[in-house]
Amino acid sequence: MEPSLSAANLDIRRFTHADLPEIRQTLIDVHADALAEEMEDEFNQRFPWFVDHWGGLPGYSCVIAYDGDKAVGFAYGAPGSPGHEWWREYVDPAPAKDRTFSYSELAVSPGWRKQGVAERLTRALMAGRDEDLVVLLVDREHPRVRALYESWGFRKVGERQPFADSPVFAVMLAELPLS
């Protein structure tokens, strides 16, 4: 099947914590395709652990973009735990409203990049959220990705290295709904 190469033609499907057994391998496969040139990095090889961790959270939400029956991208995350808004240390004064959605992952297969898929997935994931804010981490070595998030209303509020072997990330925050 020839790809349609139009984000508008993709079928965006929503999944929850209960669907993880059905979608787990799809997420791992798309991630491996999207980061094929970076998969020798041990941190990237731990992605299945992150899928299980995030997918194990009761509020987990995931969207997957399909071209026919082929998954070409995904985005997922989960609500933050009230009272544990770790991002607050970067914002002074902290916003009065702080219910936060933690946007954990976004991956798009190389052949689908620069087609609007990332934005469509992000907006689908954030649609109808009850939280006030959304937080994410972006590898500071990827300024184009950071600029993309900034174009959707995110702003950098700090930097964080959550694991000893992880990159240093820009901490980005946006109000919901996204502008």
Image (cartoon, rainbow, N blue to C red):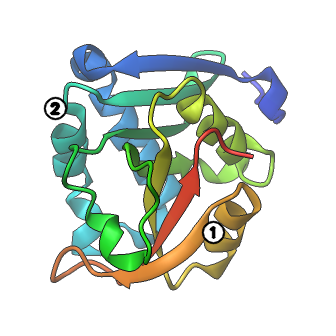
Q: Which residue is mark 2?
A: 56
Q: CA distance from mark 2 to mark 1?
A: 27 Å
- Percent of width and height locating residue 118: 66, 46
Q: Quadrant of residue 125?
A: top right
Q: Residue at x 78, y 27 (%)?
A: 2
Q: Is residue 41 above or below residue 47?
A: below
Q: Quadrant of residue 38?
A: bottom left
Q: Which residue is mark 1?
A: 145
53 sits to left or right of 166: left
Q: Residue at x 28, y 30 (%)?
A: 24
Q: Is residue 170 above or below residue 122?
A: below
Q: Nearer the viewer, residue 82 or 168?
A: 82
Quadrant for the N terminus, please: top right
Label 2: state its secondary structure.
Answer: loop
Q: Nearer the viewer, residue 80 or 35?
A: 80
- Percent of width and height locating residue 124: 62, 29
Of mark 2 and mark 1, the one earlier in the sequence is 2
Amino acid type for the residue under numbered disc 1? Val
Q: Are marks 2 and 1 in contact (CB under 8 Å)?
A: no
Q: Nearer the viewer, residue 101 or 113?
A: 101
Q: Quadrant of residue 91?
A: bottom left
Amino acid type for the residue under numbered disc 2? Gly
Residue 41 appears in the figure? yes
Q: Residue at x 39, y 50 (%)?
A: 98
Residue 127 numbered tag? none
Label 2: how many residues lie within 10 Å, few (<14), some (14-19) or many (20+)? some
- Percent of width and height locating residue 146: 62, 72
Residue 71 appears in the figure? no
- Percent of width and height locating residue 126: 56, 34
Label 1: state its secondary structure.
Answer: helix
